[in-house]
Image (cartoon, helix red, strand yellow):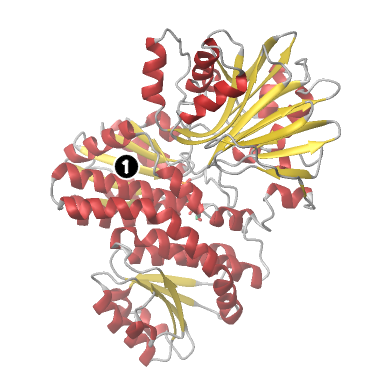
């Protein structure tokens, strides 16, 4: 998730405006920054890796000349955070400059075609194909607008782009597919951006750009065209009455809620990861003697769920281990035949890195799944996959958890295919369902917000909670419990449901809330007995269950229904969403700030 910005003003230089706008977009990514302006029929670029303030201290981002310019703040996806990979990217003649947010899926094919035509690439990014593609079209005699139109028609994946061209110095051409894009208009100029906060101090008049649209910004204003039929789309600006604080959170009261609602988008991003890295990691897992899945907190819960995925689909036994226990538990036996997949959103968690260092010194194969390209985990892993969720600001992990699950499910599926253990029909149906998961998540978010708020209103003053699930849903129970505890400070325990009768059941007394995660999978029959055991002791039963499961519903005091026919291995991705919302509303009802829970940090860099 990167931030893009573009700006044409009537008087003065745009560079200080771009710099200030990028600061407001920094929450979208902060590993590199860059800007380009047009002055005296030339494109001038300043860019480097590092946070905006650090880069500005060295390069001075305010002194580029020109009334027209674009800028970018980066969250690396393709290519590590080095200067060469920072945006804007330019064509061979350095006349076309492009900033981009999104992922170009077919960049490898396009790059080969363009290289065969003599184009020279200098970065490892997917974005760099865009200026070269536009250059190629301009060479054929097209204008900037026509060239950009033709170029985006060849792009597969997601993008919001802003393009400038030295020989048409009065224009910025933007286009959108899936990644956000919004235009701002004021008396002094026109702006384009990934979101409204970037230009809010300059104007509160905004025009939302839809998927499949191209916009031309000029001194005269803006013109929107539909890419499919090239028709002009008339659209008036709306007046935005957000405070600057609300604007940063895109109108949501907290980052956590914004990030919960971002999950359809972040899940879609996980379906566009680079094939070669997933394939390579699958290969390593296939050849492994023994496999450990090592992580902390929420990432550990993703590992726990993954152990069921690998076992059920790929017939691969894996050991999910809490990072801080790894050295004690397996430190002596881990060796050259061990393969360890470290899962860490930040890639910097001290416990995870300590386990990694130990394993590395014992010559184990290190694999990584992370959200932070350039992190220590990416530097030390033999192969890593970046889950591409964009920065997560809320301390509680939400969107990064569901993305981890999606990537791990894809790995398990690939391995299953490779090993030929599961029928093609089953694999195909799982692959199809995985593609539908972002839409189903969207549906759940639409229908469950109010319900989970009401549930929190009903239960907010209970002293203690119990979360139970069987099979893969035990991982969901652990994660639901962690979310509730860490932000609402409600004490809670979680167990695999079958284990509850071996001790924890003694806690139950009338009215004690017990949350069961019980999708209709192989564990369904047995979990009914566990629900009955709790019900018989007067517990208040809250069920996360499939819609249409009428028998189960009869047992519930509160039934939270998710769409039916969700395959078992994918169910945690969807079942956890209502639990995230419940934790969020519980925190609010109990008077706590869900974004900054006490005693916690987003990245725990102490052991
Ligand atoms: C919980 C949470 C933490 C992290 C844990 C590991 O909401 O965010 O439990 O999951 O500190 O962090 P990463 O994944 O960055 O290694």
In the rendered view, tell whether residue 581 sits above or below residue 222: below
Residue 87 visible, this orientation: no
Please give the name of the residue rendered at 45% of the width and 56% of the height, measured from the top-left corner: 439
* x then y, percent, for residue 294: 34, 47
* x then y, percent, for residue 225: 62, 36
Please give the name of the residue rendered at 18% of the width and 36% of the height, measured from the top-left corner: 337
Q: Quadrant of residue 283?
A: top left
* x then y, percent, for residue 425: 18, 54
Q: Nearer the viewer, residue 132 or 589?
A: 132
Q: Nearer the viewer, residue 502 or 441?
A: 441
Circle count: 1
Q: Nearer the viewer, residue 504 or 172?
A: 172
Q: Nearer the viewer, residue 561 or 282?
A: 561
* x then y, percent, for residue 298: 44, 55
In the rendered view, tell whether residue 336 sits above or below residue 564: above
In the rendered view, tell whether residue 91 sits above or below residue 283: above
411 horizontally vs 563: left or right: left
For label 1, count other residues whose C-alpha is less than 10 Å away and answer few (under 14), some (14-19) or many (20+): many
In the rendered view, tell whether residue 469 sits above or below residue 428: below
Identify residue for label 1.
341
Residue 210 visible, this orientation: yes
354 horizontally vs 12: left or right: left
437 horizontally vs 592: left or right: left
41 horizontally vs 511: left or right: right
Q: Secondary structure at mark 1?
A: strand
Q: Quadrant of residue 284?
A: top left
Which part of the image, by quadrant, shows the N terminus?
top right
Please give the name of the residue rendered at 47% of the width and 84% of the height, measured from the top-left corner: 512
Q: Quadrant of residue 254?
A: bottom right
């Amino acid at each position: 998730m990167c931030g893009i910005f573009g700006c044409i003003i009537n008087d003065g230089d745009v560079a200080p405006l771009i710099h200030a706008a990028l600061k407001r977009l920094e929450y979208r990514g902060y590993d590199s920054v860059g800007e380009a302006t047009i002055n005296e029929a030339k494109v001038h670029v300043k860019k480097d890796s590092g946070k905006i303030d650090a880069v500005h201290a060295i390069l001075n981002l305010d002194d580029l000349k020109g009334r027209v310019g674009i800028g970018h703040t980066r969250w690396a996806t393709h290519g590590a955070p080095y200067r060469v990979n920072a945006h804007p990217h330019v064509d061979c003649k350095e006349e076309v400059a492009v900033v981009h947010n999104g992922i170009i899926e077919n960049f490898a094919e396009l790059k080969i075609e363009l290289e065969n035509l003599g184009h020279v690439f200098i970065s490892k990014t997917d974005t760099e194909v865009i200026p070269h593609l536009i250059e190629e079209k301009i060479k054929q005699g097209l204008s900037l607008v026509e060239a950009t139109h033709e170029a985006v028609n060849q792009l597969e994946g997601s993008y919001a782009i802003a393009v400038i061209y030295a020989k048409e110095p009065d224009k910025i051409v933007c286009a959108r597919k899936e990644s956000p894009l919004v235009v701002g208009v004021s008396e002094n100029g026109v702006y384009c951006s990934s979101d409204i906060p970037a230009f809010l101090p300059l104007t509160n008049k905004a025009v939302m750009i839809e998927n499949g649209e191209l916009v031309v910004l000029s001194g005269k204003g803006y013109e929107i065209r539909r890419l499919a039929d090239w028709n002009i789309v008339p659209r008036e600006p709306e007046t935005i009455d957000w405070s600057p604080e609300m604007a940063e959170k895109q109108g949501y009261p907290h980052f956590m809620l914004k990030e919960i609602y971002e999950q359809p988008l972040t899940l879609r991003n996980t379906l566009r990861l680079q094939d070669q890295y997933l394939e390579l990691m699958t290969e390593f897992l296939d050849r492994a003697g023994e496999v450990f899945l090592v992580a902390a907190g929420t990432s550990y819960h993703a590992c726990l769920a993954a152990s069921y995925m690998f076992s059920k689909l790929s017939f691969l036994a894996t050991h999910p281990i809490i990072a801080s226990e790894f050295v004690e538990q397996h430190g002596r036996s881990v060796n050259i035949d061990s393969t360890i997949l470290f899962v860490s959103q930040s890639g910097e968690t001290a416990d995870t890195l300590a386990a990694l260092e130990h394993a590395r010194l014992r010559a184990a194969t290190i694999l990584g799944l992370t959200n932070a390209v350039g992190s220590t985990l990416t530097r030390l892993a033999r192969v890593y996959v970046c889950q591409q969720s964009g920065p997560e600001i809320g301390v509680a992990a939400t969107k990064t958890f569901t993305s981890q699950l999606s990537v791990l499910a894809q790995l398990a599926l690939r391995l299953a295919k490779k090993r030929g253990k599961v029928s093609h029909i089953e694999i195909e149906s799982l692959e199809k369902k995985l593609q539908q998961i972002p839409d189903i998540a969207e549906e759940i978010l639409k229908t469950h917000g109010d319900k989970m708020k009401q549930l929190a209103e009903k239960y907010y003053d209970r002293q203690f909670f119990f979360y139970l699930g069987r099979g893969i849903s035990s991982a969901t129970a652990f994660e639901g419990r962690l979310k509730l505890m860490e932000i609402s400070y409600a004490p809670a325990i979680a167990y695999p449901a079958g284990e509850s009768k071996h001790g924890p059941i003694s806690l139950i007394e009338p009215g004690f809330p017990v949350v069961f995660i019980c999708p209709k999978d192989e564990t369904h029959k047995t979990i009914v007995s566990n629900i009955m055991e709790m019900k018989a002791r007067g517990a208040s039963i809250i069920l996360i269950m499939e819609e249409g499961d009428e028998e189960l519903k009869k047992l519930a005091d509160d039934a939270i229904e998710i769409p039916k026919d969700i395959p078992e291995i994918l169910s945690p991705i969807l079942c956890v969403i209502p639990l995230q919302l419940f934790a969020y509303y519980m925190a609010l009802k109990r008077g706590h700030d869900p974004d900054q829970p006490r005693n916690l940090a987003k990245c725990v860099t102490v052991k």
